[in-house]
Amino acid sequence: MITMDDIVRDGHPVLRQTAEAVELPPTEEEKQQLADMIEFVKNSQDADIAEKYGLRPGVGLAAPQINISKRMIAVHCEDEDGEEYSYALFNPRIVSHSVKRAYLATGEGCLSVDEAIPGFVPRYQKIRVKATTLEGEDIDIRLKGFPAIVFQHEIDHLNGIMFYDHIQKDQPFAEPENSVAIGRS
C-alpha cells in the first residue's frame, strides 16, 4: 500500500526527469505498482481510510511522485456533472487538444508540493488521450473540463513539469487568454 511517506516532495530530482515509456506488455511488478497507485488515489478520497493512514486527498498520481520514473498515471475524479473518471494507465499521451483553455478558479495543488502556490494554471479545455489500461486494453479517451485538467497535470509529471511552471510569475492571477474558469478544486 502506498502512503504519504512514499510520495516524493518538490525538489526531488525524479520530479524533473522525463519518465521512461513502459515496455508493453508491462511486467507484473509494473502492473502491481499501477494498481497500488489507483488504490492510493481512491483511498485518499475515502475520509475514513484517509484519516486512518494520514493520506492527503488527491485526484491523481503519477509514477514519478512515488520515485518511479516510468510513464504511468492513476486518475480518479468526477466531472462537473458527477460522472466518474477512474483510470490506471500506461504510457498516456495527449494526441490532440482544443485551442480554448481552461483553468481551476481555485488554482491547482499537488501531493508532491506541501505548500499552496497561488495562481491560475492554464490548461487545454479539451484533450484526447491514448494509453494502455492496467488490463492491457488500448484506449482513446476524450476529456473536457476538470478531468482534462487532472490528466494534463499528471501527464506533465511524466515530462518533468510541475503545475506551478505554468503560472505567470509576474501576474499569477491574470486570466489566461481564450479560457474558461472551472469552479472545482
Image: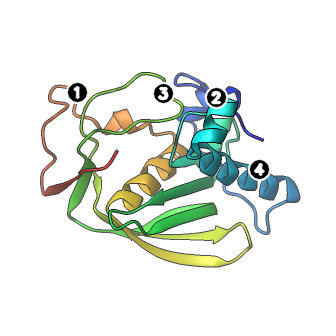
* Disc on res. 54: 2
Q: Secondary structure at mark 4?
A: helix
- Which residue type does callout 1 highlight? Lys
The coloring applied to the image is rainbow
10 Å crowding of disc 2: few (<14), some (14-19), many (20+): some
* Residue drawn at (87%, 59%) of the image: 28
Task: Give coordinates of residue 118: x percent, y percent.
Answer: 28, 28
Q: Earlier in the sequence, mark 2 or mark 3?
A: 2
Dot 4 corresponds to which residue? 33
Would you identify the image quadrant in which residue 69 lies? top right
* Residue drawn at (34%, 26%) of the image: 117
Classify residue 132 as left or right of residue 136. left
Q: Give the Cα separation between the discs numbered 1 and 3.
A: 17 Å
Q: Give the Cα separation between the discs numbered 4 and 3.
A: 21 Å
- The answer to whether marks 1 and 3 mark residues whose Cβ atoms lie closer than 8 Å is no
Task: Give coordinates of residue 162: x percent, y percent.
Answer: 44, 36
Task: Give coordinates of residue 24: x percent, y percent.
Answer: 76, 67
Q: Earlier in the sequence, mark 1 or mark 3?
A: 3
Depth order, front residue of 83/73: 83
Q: Secondary structure at mark 2?
A: loop
Dot 1 corresponds to which residue? 169
10 Å crowding of disc 3: few (<14), some (14-19), many (20+): some
Classify residue 184 as left or right of residue 10. left
Classify residue 76 as left or right of residue 142. right
- The answer to whether marks 2 and 1 mark residues whose Cβ atoms lie closer than 8 Å is no
Q: Secondary structure at mark 1?
A: loop
10 Å crowding of disc 4: few (<14), some (14-19), many (20+): some
- Which residue type does callout 4 highlight? Gln
Q: Secondary structure at mark 3?
A: loop
Give the vertical position of 144 relative to 139 (above or below): above
Which label lies toward us, 1 or 3? Answer: 3
